[in-house]
Amino acid sequence: MTISLHEFIQGLPKAELHLHIEGSLEPELMFALAQRNGVTLPYATVEEIRAAYNFTDLQSFLNLYYAGAAVLLTEEDFYDLTMAYIQRALADQVRHVELFFDPQTHTARGVSTEIVFAGIARALRQARQEHAFSGSMILCFLRHLSEEDALLTLQAALPLREQYADLWNGVGLDSAEVDNPPERFARVFAQARELGFHLVAHAGEEGPPAYIHSALDILQVERIDHGVRAEEDEALMQKLAKTQMPLTVCPLSNLKLCVVDDLSKHNLARMLRAGLCITINSDDPAYFGGYMNANFIASADALDLSRAELVQLAKNGFCASFAPAEQKQLWLEELDAFASSTH
Ligand code: HPA
Ligand code: ZN
């Protein structure tokens, strides 16, 4: 079958490994939840919300992202939020998501960890039943807060581990990166590792390559979220290529947060061509202008990615996931069948 490049991208089966569920809160749903919960937003219309999404750096985004999350109060809210994301993911041929969630953003407002888990899990389990869609949950610690707070957050969530054993399998590190290096969270990551959780951390988005080194060497993470500043350190690039350490790159996020000023200058194609395990992801799609297909299409157009490279990026997503080996094999076979039946 002959199809266009964009149709090829749309049809490609994908896995998403870097998605903050709170960052998938579209202005329409933010408005609806504000009304449902009697929360006052500092915006009169959905258009006003969208107009405010003009970011200059990570912090300028985080300010609005945490403010927007204030409408999330009940289990139903977290269910609706997650279900809305799943619908977008299904439309983009996403087969698997390992979603991030930030309990501290919610417990600080009096919303319990139990409510957050229950709403997200109900949506993920329903999607597993009704569609060929799987998901898991990665609990992220906010790095602008203390390690003590992160330790308490892990403690508060542990009683839920058994109940959500089919979903919660990892911990991560997000929020304001600069001046909050990974090593500040060495103890909580060591504890999570001993408990058998998968480990990931944001590093090298705005922070220097040294933060990628410490995420790897001190936290012992299995994937680096973003990691685009690795290119400033040749020895680190060699190590990432040699170990096939996955980087969960988020092109439209990098553009919106001014990590790059033009997608044609994004280094993801160079890093892919240098043999690194690069994946494409949407990060906070409601804030950054697009879900998975939009990220793939914008990257392909700006960087002249070939179909073989797009297949490699999609494969990397499945291979770098924490799903069982037999499941990965099935996805890779589906991907190969799709790629070889189109041109
Ligand atoms: N970086 C750090 N923290 C975040 C991000 C991000 O891109 N999105 C949501 N929290
Ligand atoms: Zn992120």
Image: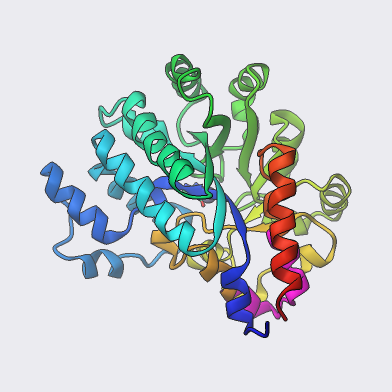
Q: Which residues are magenta?
A: 298-314
Q: Residue at x 63, y 83 (%)?
A: 3
- Report whether residue 49 is seen: yes
Nearest the viewer among 211 and 197 is 197
- Report whether residue 264 is seen: no
Asked if residue 89 lies left or right of residue 297, the reply is left
Quadrant in the rendering for residue 228: bottom right
Q: Position of residue 224 (x, y in %)?
A: 67, 45
Residue 270 is inside the magenta segment? no
Quadrant in the rendering for residue 12: bottom right
Residue 58 versus residue 163 in the image, above or below? below
Q: Is the stretch drawn in magenta largely helix, strand or loop?
A: helix
Residue 303 versus residue 119 in the image, above or below? below
Q: Residue at x 73, y 31 (%)?
A: 220
Nearest the viewer among 223 and 63 is 223
Quadrant in the rendering for residue 145: top left
Residue 42 versus residue 245 in the image, above or below? below
Q: Residue at x 28, y 34 (%)?
A: 75
